Image: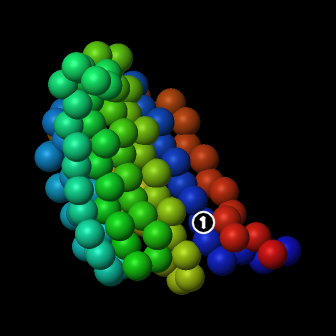
Amino acid sequence: MSAKGRHVTLDYTGFTGEGQWMLAVLQNAVERSNVREVHAHVSEFDGTESPPGFAAVVLIDESHVSAHCYADDGILAVDCFTCGDADPNVIADDIHQQLLAVNPTLCLVQRTELERFVT
């Protein structure tokens, strides 16, 4: 079996931060990985229709990098999905280091990696 893509997920507790800041973290990691950004967007949720928090995404020509936060619970989910030669671990490691630099007590609860587009 071979795979054309890989998907790395990171789940955190103890997160405090805002969506615009997180979007910048994602964009910085994408830029440093030499993957091409296609589009970026963040939606912040005030709790009226969805739980407080945000969803941020950077579309890349190889797939996407995203983050979703439930602010009241302090939980953050990050995923890095790439295809071709781009390594999602490089992006995930960069994001992780940026997060810890600002919040050293942040706890990485789970990190997973999956092969995608398996043939």
* Outermost residue, top side: 72
The reply to whether residue 31 is in sight is: yes
Report the residue at 35% width, 17% height from top: 73
**112 on left or right of 10:** right
Residue 17 in the image: above or below residue 87: above
Q: Amino acid at mark 1?
A: Arg
**75 on left or right of 44:** right
Q: Nearer the viewer, residue 102 or 88?
A: 88
Give percent across and percent down for residue 116: 67, 65
| Rendered image quadrant of residue 118 | bottom right
Give percent across and percent down for residue 49: 28, 24
Report the residue at 22% width, 19% height from top: 48
Residue 29 in the image: above or below residue 99: below
**18 on left or right of 96:** left
Report the residue at 31% width, 68% height from top: 30
Q: How is the image coloured?
A: rainbow
Q: Quadrant of the C terminus?
A: bottom right
Give percent across and percent down for residue 80: 46, 58
Q: Badge 1: few (under 14), some or many (20 or more) residues near its Cα, within 10 Å? A: many
Helix, strand or loop for disc 1: strand
Report the residue at 17% width, 55% height from top: 24
Give percent across and percent down for residue 13: 39, 25
Residue 40 in the image: above or below residue 102: below
**10 on left or right of 28:** right
| Rendered image quadrant of residue 29 | bottom left
Q: Which residue is mark 1?
A: 6
